[in-house]
Structures are given as C-alpha cells and as structure tokens.
C-alpha cells in the first residue's frame, strides 16, 4: 500500500549528542577505575588488622 513512500533518511547524530555519549562513557569508565583504585588497598591489606580495629573501638 505504501510501497512508493521511502522512509526518511537517518539523521546524523549532532555534535552535542556525540559529546554527551562520550561524556557518559568516560564518566562510567572513570567511576569504575576510581572504585577499583580506591578498593585496592582494602583488598590488598590482610583482613586481620588490629590497629584499625582498636582505633574504631577507642572512638566509643
């Protein structure tokens, strides 16, 4: 029925849309990298650290 109607051409993404996608991607990557960097000391230190536990108990 609508065989002679051609679909509208795909609109190219504007600079703002491309910049927004890049910014979103970089934000996600930076958040992941930051969380890994901040989590590395907690993962590398042994679980039995009496100094930190004593400091926490002295606060009460």
Image (cartoon, rainbow, N blue to C red):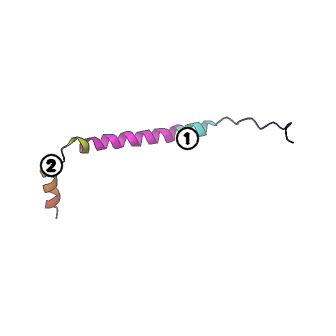
2 vs 9, nearest the viewer: 2
Q: Nearer the viewer, mark 2 or mark 1?
A: 2
Rendering coords of residue 17 (x, y %): 60, 40
Question: Residue at horizontal 33%, vertical 41%?
Answer: 36
- On residue 20, the disc is 1
Secondary structure beneath label 2:
loop
Magenta highlight on residue 53: no
Question: Residue at horizontal 19%, vertical 47%?
Answer: 47
Q: In the picture, residue 7 is in which quadrant?
A: top right
Q: How many marks?
A: 2
Magenta-tinted stretch: 22-41
Residue projecting furthest to the front: 1
36 vs 3, nearest the viewer: 3
Magenta stretch: dominant SS? helix
Question: Residue at horizontal 25%, vertical 43%?
Answer: 43
- On residue 49, the disc is 2
Q: In the picture, residue 33 is in which quadrant?
A: top left
Left or right of residue 12: residue 8: right
Left or right of residue 33: residue 20: right
- On residue 37, the disc is none
Secondary structure beneath label 1:
helix
On-image quarter of the C terminus: bottom left
On-image quarter of the N terminus: top right
Question: Residue at horizontal 74%, vertical 35%?
Answer: 9
Rendering coords of residue 32 (x, y %): 39, 41
């Amino acid at each position: 029925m609508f065989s002679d109607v051609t679909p509208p051409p795909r609109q190219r993404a504007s600079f703002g849309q491309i910049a927004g996608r890049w910014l979103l991607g970089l934000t996600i990557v930076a958040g992941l990298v930051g969380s890994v960097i901040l989590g590395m000391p907690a993962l590398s230190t042994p679980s039995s650290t009496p100094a930190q536990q004593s400091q926490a108990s002295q606060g009460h």
